[in-house]
Image (tube, grey):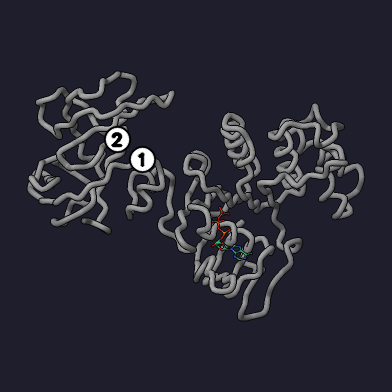
Amino acid sequence: MSVVITGLSKHFGSVRAIDDLSIEFRPGAITVLLGASGCGKTTTLRCIAGLEQPTAGEITIDDHAVYASARGIDLPPEQRELGMVFQSYAIWPHMTVFENVALPLRAKKVAAADIDRRTRGTLATVGLSQQIERGATQLSGGQQQRVSIARCLVADPRLILMDEPLSNLDAKLRVEMRQEIRHLQRRIGATILFVTHDQEEAMSLGDEIILFDKGKVVQRGAPEELYFRPRVRYVAEFLGKANLFPVTVKPGPGGAEILAGSEGLAIARGEVSGAETPGPALAMIRPEAWQIAPAGAPGLPCRVEDTTFVGDRRELQLASPLGRQIVVTPGFRTFAAGEELSLTVAPQHMHLIRENAA
Ligand code: ATP
């Protein structure tokens, strides 16, 4: 199902929650609206749902205008044919799991036999067949969230809006539920718009990520695109850890030379993306992209300042002649504070940002 917003604004008094926003969402995919708290992602979702009246603009769902300020169109949520899942499960405590999930079908006056079949089928889809007759509040947090997802799915929506639906779950369950949502989406082929401020959730869940800042889209693309090819510093820093430092690009016949620091230290040479034009740039190297060589080998000479064990990886904080701390993930090899080493990076693992070069 296609969703298009055009010139959408929502102002709360003097606060411009979103301002002249235009986005075409990809049909049949999971699009994650990502950004820091207060950047306008929830407001965007609520405008699409019909829970918030925009100040101006247009919203179409499958080519039908559901909101158009100029034409006075503003369909109520129930006529927009979409499903919603929120952070709070919003399930009824006095009802059983079955009754909670059957609710939207009862409201639509669906025949009793169909209600039974569809409700049981949907509960099987979310793995709650064993809990059908249980009181909804006798379930764990993850199971309660599955009830609210089932209640959304039971009406067969082709567009599903999810606003931080996993934030109340513990870390392990959150990861499992992400996979479940992905599998579900693949099975039913719905368009899902998913709001989160968690970059890891966004990258593992999204076919596409739209990164917001202050009511505007900063960059959109596949998770790998945003992670490896950020257009601006904000994107590089929002998604994962990034080593960023000013460099000078000198294009040459054998590829570009990338010089860093006041002494013009050559830190990479070759086919670096974005190095076709000479001049200043901001180099970005992800912690896992560095290669570690013994001290004295060609490269950037560094000294280990600190090491952090993060379970699935180690991080080294290094002092370098660039005057900035560099973060490196060297796998499981251990290093001691004070140890000297040399860093190199393959040209294809360096990315140049042309904005904010300093
Ligand atoms: P969060 O992740 O914290 O929910 P968000 O990115 O979803 O943040 P919004 O909730 O869309 O951001 O809020 C965008 C801006 O609009 C914020 O500055 C917020 O304070 C403001 N805002 C949102 N709703 C209202 C409201 N009902 N009244 C006044 N201001 C509001």
Rendered-image quarter of ligand 1: bottom right
Quarter of the image for the N terminus: give it. Answer: bottom right
Badge number at residue 327: 2
Mark 1 element type: loop
Quarter location, residue 49:
bottom right
Instruction: Identify the residue at image location x=58%, y=52%.
Output: 193
Q: Tell me: is circle 1 under 8 Å from ligand 1.
A: no
Q: Which amino acid type corresponds to the residue marked 1 in the rendered image?
A: Lys
Q: Which secondary structure lies at badge 2?
A: strand
Question: Residue 132: which quarter of the image?
Answer: top right
Q: Which amino acid does label 2 sit on?
A: Val
State which quarter of the image contains the C terminus.
bottom left
Label number found at residue 182: none
Q: Nearer the N terminus, badge 1 or badge 2?
A: 1
Q: Mark 1 points at which residue?
A: 241
How far across and how far down the image is residue 192, in percent? Answer: 60, 50
Residue 196 in the image: state x and y as whole percent: 55, 48
